[in-house]
Image (tube, helix red, strand yellow):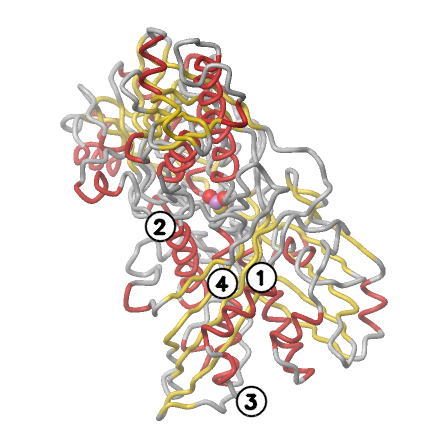
Amino acid sequence: MNKTIGKPINRVDGRLKVTGEAKYSGEIPLENIAYGVIITSTIARGRIKHINTSVAEKSPGVIGIITHLDAPKLYARPNFGHEGAAGEKLAPLQNSTIYYSGQAIGVAIADTLERATYAASLVKVDYVVETPLTEMGKERDRAYPIEKFVEFTVEFALGDADAEFAKAEVKIEATYTTPTEHHNPMEPHATAAVWEGENLTVYDSTQYIFGMREGLAKMLGIPHANVRVLCKFIGGSFGCKYGLWAHTPLAAIAARQFRRPVKIVLTREQMFGLVGHRSETEQQIKLGATPEGRLTALIHQGISQTSIFDEFVETFTTTSRTMYAVPNLRTAQSVVPLNKGTPTIMRAPGESVGTFALESAMDELAWALKLDPIELRLRNYAEVHPARQVPWSSKSLKECYALAAEKFGWSRRTPEPGSMRDDRYLIGMGMASACFPMEHFPASAIARIFADGSVVVQSGSQEIGTGTATVMAQLTADMLGVPVEKVRFEFGDTELARSPGTVGSGTAASVGTAVHGAAKAVRAKVVALAQKDPNSPLYGVPEPDIETSQERIFVKNNSAKGETYQAVLARHNLEYIDANFDAKPEEEEEFAKCSFGAHFVEVRVDPELGEVRLTRVVGAFAAGRILNEKTARSQISGATIMGIGMALHEETITDPHTGRIVNDNLAEYHLPVNADIPPIDIYFIDEVDTHVNPIGVKGAGEVGITGIIAAIANAIYHATGKRIRDLPITPDKLL
Ligand code: MOS
């Protein structure tokens, strides 16, 4: 039977999603459900002087209003990256202090969503208003340096980058800025809380059910074991749903207080403020090089925003420590606390905006040297990890450059800016490197073969739309030699085997290794039963001589000598047989592990209107083994589209005087739409990586959003001769 791994098979949950049968967290039918609507602060700094709920409480259908005056005690959790899915440390409704606009200050509960929404609008709040700190550039005196963020290196030095930059023959020194951005998945955050005695069940749109369980238990001051978190389907999620934000504990306390299930679904406006964002950044890059184009110094430093009460770092210097062979390297970052919410991870946090700066600067250097941008990158190709000086587990970036350049037709490009035209339009071609570190987290799984031959494989995990359920079924099917339709992957429930958050493009590697291990272990159990059984055709046959295919186990090269799983189970009177597996990433630091790629972009710029249209994007990526070419391509093209949004459209605008977000809706916060997206061609370079994990997977998600932004900026420079170092690249900046 043909193996399914690598094949572009359809999503196992595709039908459920397109027919509407899939139930998302806000759609789970629950008896006697009440609706919660969060009341948010309209000021960014100060405190609540009076809050009057008396009119709201008398409004029709209202069950109750909770504010800081009567909320139960909630316990703050550690900051991001520690125990639990900490989005922000702040526990809601614990006192009258306001740190940011849009902060939760109450929740109205009613029998319908409309009545709860109306009641929330009737709550009167008087504030003591203080002047908020809202502008990163103006508050830079308050910046403080970061050595390390969670486990991520930030401050780093190799050689003497400053001295070498000072004496370099060719220099680039530039500052790049990127704005605040919001995640905006189609499905807003949704949660429904149900208590039965001391036990809480939460249906939550989360990327991390186990973290949510632990964070919520800690916040409520109850044992983990009393909390169950379920999440079956997610309508998009780019990091914001990794965190635990105010709405989930608010639903839990309201459900406990009013003794009925409570559901809270955020409004689109609340998606801007209650659940994190990508911080704005101001990044300085200094590149020193020889006239031949060899880098002698690289300095990458700058600032990003954090909140008054949390420390979150947009780790934009990561790629600068990874991408190029440079003997003198220094990275440094500081954060500026402002009266804005706590930023959080958003698709390639750090690397997306960091590669905009680094890969734009490399393009600037290529122009200064009059070198082809690919050639400059090849001259500085890192054969080992530059900061750690260890070999790569695998790296096919050269092949990515070559393949994407050929498919794109890079050779047709004439180097001079403004030299390519089509009628009155300026045509530009740009490229950039892509890179994302491989993440591998501990994960567990159970595989079970039933008497009827069907197979279930389970791991807590979450399916955020990446194809997890599909590739886990494929891994199991291939290991057991059964068709993929016979395998069901069960996930999204803290009652199942422990698994990590769906983050860092690490799920295929982490959960995949666990699923692969569990399937292998259950196969071994069946084989052992047969080997020891005189009634089995496989009696006494050694394990290495046994193969599985077509739902059977049999002797290699002699498929007639064997039997079905069903036959083995039936003879032993077993309803099912199962095995679990705990996968742990190896601690060894022998290898550096990254997915790489290259993006090539063609733009068409209207010189009179400053309008940029993308005409083509071609990318080639190397990410270890690709488990499913269709879902992997979908990940990379989705990330590419998000990168197009960052390059040309997206920007959250805050009124500096009030600290209020002024474009908190999809009309004024511009996400790319179909008309903005050109054909995107994605190619994969096959890699056999035996160092990363038994399945050879590095991860193919976030790498797609790295590099693309710079590739677009570089193409715009090629078209117009204008170097835009401030995102998004809107028409006004080109006129
Ligand atoms: Mo992603 S930012 O790791 O959800």
**Coordinates of residue 602 in the picture (x, y in percent):** 43, 76
Front residue of this view, candidates 717 and 508:
508
Is residue 632 rendered to the left or right of residue 595? left
Residue, far left: 60
The disc, 2 or 4, on the residue closer to the chain's N-terminal end is 2
Q: Position of residue 223 (x, y in %)?
A: 48, 12
Pointer 1 residue: 355
The residue at which mark 4 appears reads as: 620
* Residue highlighted by disc 2: 8
Mark 2 or mark 1, earlier in chain = 2
- Above or below, 616 against 215 in this view is below
Q: In terms of secondary structure, where does tag 2 sit?
A: loop
Secondary structure at numbered mark 3: loop
Q: Do the residues under discs 2 and 1 have CB atoms within 8 angstroms?
A: no
Q: What amino acid type is highlighted by mark number 4?
A: Ala
Q: Identify the secondary structure beneath mark 4.
A: strand
* C-alpha gap between disc 3 and disc 4: 25 Å
What's the residue type where badge 1 is placed? Thr
Asked if residue 671 is positioned above or below residue 439 in the image, the reply reads below
The numbered mark, 3 or 4, whose residue comes first in the sequence reads: 3
Vertical placement of residue 28 versus 398, above or below = above
